[in-house]
Amino acid sequence: MTIEIDNLRISFVGREVVKGVSFNVAKGASFGIVGESGSGKSTVLRAMAGLNNDWSGRIAFSGEDAPLFRPPAFFRKVQMVFQDPYGSLHPRQTIDRILSELPLVHGMDNIDDRIAKVLSAVALPQTARFRYPHQLSGGQRQRVAIARALIAEPEVLLLDEPTSALDVSVQAEILNLLADLRAERNLTYVMVSHNLSVITHLCTEVGVMIDGHMVEQVTAEDLRLGNVNHAHTRELRSLSVELEEPA
Amino acid sequence: MLVDIQNLKIGFKSRTGFHQAVKGVSLKLGTEKLGIVGESGSGKSLTARALMKLLPTQTVIEADKLEFDGIDIRSASEKQMRTIRGKRAGFILQDPKYSLNPVKTVGSQVAEAWRTHKGGSKRAALEAAINLLEMVKIRDPKKVAASYPHEVSGGMGQRVMIAMMLAPDPELLIADEPTSALDATVQAEILRLIEELVSERGMGLLLISHDLPLVSHFCDRVAVMYAGHVMEELKASDLLSAQHPYTRGLLNCMPSLMHPKERLPVLTRDPEWLK
Amino acid sequence: MNATFRNWALDENPSSRRQAAWGNWYRIWLNLRGNALGMIGLTIIAIFIGIAIFAPLLATHDPAMQDLGNRLAAPSALHWFGTDELGRDIYSRLLYGGRVTLGMVIAVVVLVAPIGLAIGCIAGYFGGIVDTILMRITDIFLAFPRLVLALAFVAALKPGVESAILAIALTAWPPYARMARAETLTVRGSDFIAAYRLTGGSSWRIIFRHIMPLCVPTLIVRVTLDMSSIIITAASLGFLGMGAQPPSPEWGAMIATAKRFIFEQWWVAAIPGIAIFCVSLAFNFLGDALRDVLDPKGN
């Protein structure tokens, strides 16, 4: 599924927070959006998912313009994983209930089978199925959140800082899982993060956002080599190079 | 020796039983910068809080030695602790939003901190507060002093917190994840500021963080904690030649911009480490 | 059998939805059992409900039978709690009165709680114009003095228990709506609700299946705290002749008519008073315990 974003503008109560962002993602590719808090990166992602209705411009999946209010079928194609695995699972529902919601809405068959399969796809034990979110670790919860997105059998996965609330050892497991899933299912990823290393690990192309503008689009390789133009990209890169390696 | 901890154990009683969170930690700190690094649940914050006696009363704390500048913390009274906390040792927390009073201006809060420890008139305190704000490299200290906490950014809020902590000229600064709520660009500035202030004033620094490489840039020594134990303590500059498999695992499993890896190595935990 | 059920329900790794649900309920029950005050409350309520149900078996007299020659008698072997101003047996009237009073309270709660919950959740979830309209209506009902509104309503209908129930319900729902709205506002922006929006399910589905259950524990506590004031309102209506009609016994009406003799024949008013007090207190205890127990993190 190709994704085209053209001159996307998003406002919150009269204040424009995304000021004309454009980018394209090829089918099966992974695109990263990096930026600091308030740069509008998560807002772009939420508008793509259909969680925000106050936008103008063009958001198109497979060449088809996405309407302001998405029909239910849209969510079989596009799913999202949120940042905080503690806040993205209903605190009073079992994992089973959380996972079966989308199949129930869409009248899918063999729900039990689907849940079992999706749990093993994210390497969770079947015994996790009837537990509550608070009985699971942060990494396990994020796996549940990924499973919830996968059960729709989507073509596009929108990832909003999927590892920034996790410990680094768990982050490695989740990043590996996301890489494997993309390869297995030919998924298209759009991932948002503030961490350049995480973004370049998973994405081949990166858009840099500051203050509602996407100031630069660069391949991960060029970013690595330092072939960048914008001052903000350079600053983020040098911080990453300097601080993410031990002294 | 500013801080001397020997065989510290911290546990919690709960309805279902007893949970030992810190299982025999020993640390020493002089006028130097020590980083305590570990993942969530490693007991790093608890260790620092035990040192300031900031844990809830039902916590069970045992130690062969738990001293701040020769004062035994275990037997210290609440009154004694008050002369240590905030006066001889400053504590900086993760999110300045929750540490500042939302209905008072930043300047008056710093001034109040200064007056509590140094006395003097309100006017003098406010001047001192503006000086302190200048010291933490706030460009327009007068303007910031007159603003309310919600009007300043996260990085600015953290600078204000640092200014408040500096008011009584403490000997030790404990910073518990001081920058994990901040953007990368601000994070580096704040850590640099803390490092400079600590070095200039000859203070001790206890920097608690989950980010091993980051901490190593701003500390002399690093203690790596896991599941309530100190796995390894080493000079920050020796981090790349760390011996312990946990330390090495933590470093290896991070993605890196400059050294891309096809697959991230996964950290396998060995129960042997905890013996 | 008991032990097998226990092991099956408390299995850390349940293998079916049914087992997980039973396990969850069983854990809630175990926690409730461990809560002394909650159990006291539950026991008292169970006893009173039992008394109300089996009133015909337990009563020693006909509650409506008058014996004017034996007015305002002190408690004795014949009349365990004495007699009232018409010589009727207070013990028997208390038992039958439980049916009316508890029935009214339960009817009001069953009527009011879901309405308040639904209005509050809908207003909170949709926000905007829906919120404004629903909440202004709520404000109008809140602004009226409770008893006056209830009186006007009963006066418009015919006086009686059913009208009293409707009247009290009409005045009792606004606080629940406000509370449910506040609770909804705190969760509607959360990521887990966003995730449910991404299933393509309707807003109604999200409100009724995912948001409402989150508001229920606070609602339960609030309802149990309101029980006593519902009983009092019912009593006030009864006293003004707008509630339960004589000779039907009702605890509030019993107190109201007895207040003339409160200094000389104190038991006439004290007995139903004690009953109201016990039931109110029991509901409060139970409500407090339920709030703790219904939080899955506590299990």
Image (cartoon, coloured by chain):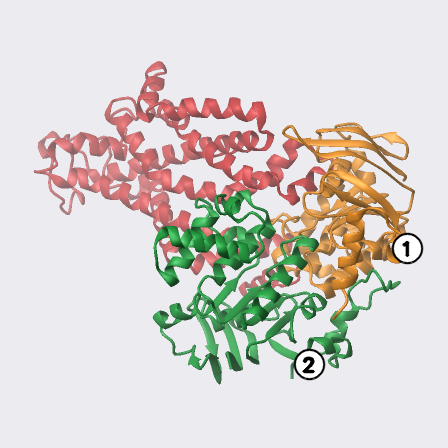
Chain C visual colour: red
Tell me which chain the residue with mark 2 is part of.
Answer: B
Query: In the depicted view, which residue is nearer to us: A118 or C280?
Result: A118
Query: In the depicted view, which residue is nearer to us: A116 or B8?
Result: B8
Q: Position of residue A47 (x, y in %)?
A: 74, 35
Q: Are marks 1 and 2 on the same chain?
A: no
Residue B48 got which mark?
none
Q: Say which residue label 2 marks.
A: B273
Q: Say which residue label 1 marks.
A: A221
How packed is label 2: few (under 14 Cα within 10 Å), some, or many (20 or more)? some
The residue sitting at 57% across, 52% down in the picture is B138
Could you tell me the amino acid type at mark 1?
Answer: Glu
Q: Position of residue B89 (x, y in %)?
A: 47, 69
Query: In the depicted view, which residue is nearer to us: C242 or B66?
Result: B66
The residue sitting at 75% across, 81% down in the picture is B243
Q: Secondary structure at mark 1?
A: helix
Count of numbered tags: 2
Q: Is residue A37 left or right of residue C84?
A: right
- Check the picture and name the quadrant holding the N terminus of chain C: bottom right
Rendered view: C135 above or below B259: above
Q: Position of residue C76 (x, y in %)?
A: 13, 46
Chain B visual colour: green
How packed is label 1: few (under 14 Cα within 10 Å), some, or many (20 or more)? some
The residue sitting at 45% across, 34% down in the picture is C176
Q: Position of residue B99 (x, y in %)?
A: 49, 54
Image quadrant assignment for residue C75: top left
Could you tell me the amino acid type at mark 2?
Answer: Trp
Tell me which chain the residue with mark 1 is part of.
Answer: A
Q: Which chain is orange?
A: A
Q: Is residue B96 left or right of residue C261?
A: right
Rendered view: A62 above or below B32: above
